[in-house]
Image: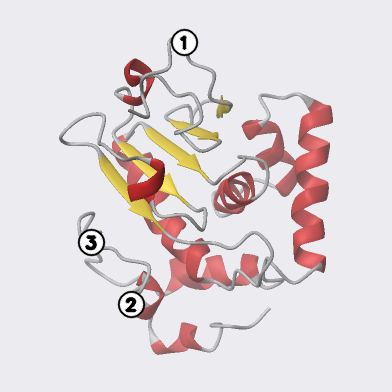
Amino acid sequence: MWFDAQEDVVRCVQVLPPYDWLFIGTNPFDGMTREFAESFDLFMNVSDCPHEVLLPEKPRPDTRMLWYPVAELSDWTYGPFYWSKRVLDEALEKKTQTYLHCDSGVNRSPCIAMAWLTSKKHSLEEAALLISRERESYADTRVSRFQRNIEQGYIPKQLPEFYARCEEYLVEGFQLDYDNILYKDPPIVALPERLAKFRGKK
């Protein structure tokens, strides 16, 4: 089974307080022990591989596993950023122990975490330091990668404005159905019409 490793060798980082309920890392199939896996309430998968492959068995019966597929080299559009904001906002409120991952844990999951942190009034540089545990060389690399993704068209340039509109026009009573959120029906469709114009734009 995926959690049969004798010791934990999965590569991940715990974000600094007050976001220390959030871990960002590599595919959990890659060396995560059962004990470590059981410490998480929620796995957020932003790779292009379904969690049924990466997590063949839930570590606990009540473990929640969500997947929003993001290709490494493609236009990510606004879908994964809106989806992750809704999930992480709720996790922040409830202090849900969360493992956010892609495949290697160096591009998609850190960038999505940094983007979400900017929606909490952190600068991009502050966000990078939070997820790099204040190691400046790591943080500089993450900022450079994030900016390169914008330049290459993977991350939308209007993301800050998009987040601001998300807050302004937040749908009242929006609830996450953890069992039925599928990549074929991303929550982006739940946005008001005034946000629809952002869909697919950079």
Question: Residue at label 1?
Answer: 7
Q: Amino acid at mark 1?
A: Glu
Residues packed near mark 1 inside 10 Å, few (<14), some (14 to 19) or many (20 plus): few
Work out whether mark 2 precedes mark 1 in sequence or the reverse, and give the earlier one: 1
Tag nearer the camera, 2 or 1:
1
Asked if residue 62 lies left or right of residue 36, the reply is left
Locate residue 167, reporting x and y percent: 45, 66
Q: Which label's residue is closer to the chain start, 2 or 3?
A: 3
Say which residue appears at 32% left-offset and 35% top-offset: 96
**Residue behind mark 2:** 190
Q: Amino acid at mark 2?
A: Ala
Q: CA distance from mark 1 to mark 3?
A: 37 Å
Q: Horizontal placement of 176 versus 33: left or right?
A: left
The residue tagged with tag 2: helix, strand or loop? helix
Look at label 3 and name its amino acid.
Answer: Gln
Give the percent coordinates (x, y) of residue 119: 56, 55
In the picture, the quarter occupied by the N terminus is top left
In the image, is residue 4 above or below residue 29?
above
